[in-house]
Amino acid sequence: MPTVDARIAVEGLFAISPRCYGHCKEPSGFEFRDDSMVVQVCPDRYVSRIVAYGSQVDQDRFKKVLRGLAPGLKEVESSDIRVASRYAWDLGLDRKNDDLIVRLAYWTQSYRRTKDESADRPALFLCSNKDSFFMQPLNSKNRLCQKCGDPGGTAVGRT
Amino acid sequence: MTDVKAIHVVHATWCPHCHPTTVEPMEKVARDLGVPFYSYDIDVPDQAAKADELVRKFGDWSEDYLIPQIFVETKEGKTRHVFTGYSESVDSTKRALSNLLNSPLFAKVNPHANR
């Protein structure tokens, strides 16, 4: 559970709209999933980054969480995760001590060049209902996962 | 933190968070403070070894760690990690570095810094 300082710091850090990375270069936003994770998504719901945060972050645990998000992420490795400490001084906070405020662990989709550079390679998206991650071709325009986009369950190949 | 004795920066020449966002401003700070400035390019084998050592011992270590990372050596003989680039955007790195340079740590070179 992050401290109040950490939560406030993270809310400030991610109140920005960087360009989508690895997909469309449109302005993207950060959405909080829970008390320990924030997701960068573009208007098409492509996931550029997933960031875990807290007073400490467990890289192995984060790797397991990532691997469990979608079948296509089972190959996430430790080398795909990078960490950063944020202190009062670089956050611009007025503190007597230059304390560590929050630690972050970043996973960036498409950070490493993949063997598959095709426009329809599998990629991670976040369903517009914000409940679930799903894989679909990079160039797909579906903003809903199969389950939400087809509540009647008539889709072929639905799992 | 006590006075700065030297500044160390781990970087890469191709990284926009490093150049011109971080390395050049920190080099100027070192010059203004009159302290040595050491930079370590992660793509130059000899320098990469030192960079890895600094990051592993004092910084934000992961197998493919973030750059830039800044370390301050103090007159007490301690080395402290003080900054890692902001993966989310170069603008975020730029803003955070400005905050760092306006903090009491570097007050000597910026008389308007918060004390």
Image (cartoon, coloured by chain):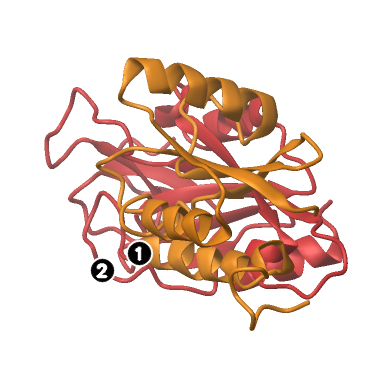
Task: Tell me, yes or no, if residue A105 can be seen here.
Answer: no
Q: Tell me where residue B68 appears, x and y as whole percent.
A: 46, 44
The residue under label 1 is A42
Answer above or below: position of B106 versus A46: below
Q: Identity of the amino acid at label 2?
A: Glu
Question: Chain A, which colour?
Answer: red
**Which of the 4 image quarters holds residue B22?**
bottom left
Check if mark 1's residue and mark 2's residue have beta carbons within 8 Å: yes
- Kindly identify which chain the residue marked by label 2 belongs to: A
Residue at 50% x, 21% y: name it. B50
Q: Quadrant of the C terminus of chain B?
A: bottom right
Tell me the orange chain.
B
Of the pair B99 and A64, the residue shown nearer to us: B99
Of the pair B67 and A136, the residue shown nearer to us: B67
Task: Tell me, yes or no, if residue A23 can be seen here.
Answer: yes
> Dot 2, crowdedness within 10 Å: few (<14), some or many (≥20)?
some
Residue farthest toward the front in the current orientation of the protein: B34
The residue under label 2 is A26
Q: Tell me where residue A129 appears, x and y as whole percent.
A: 51, 64
Question: Would you say A94 lies left or right of B110 here?
Answer: right
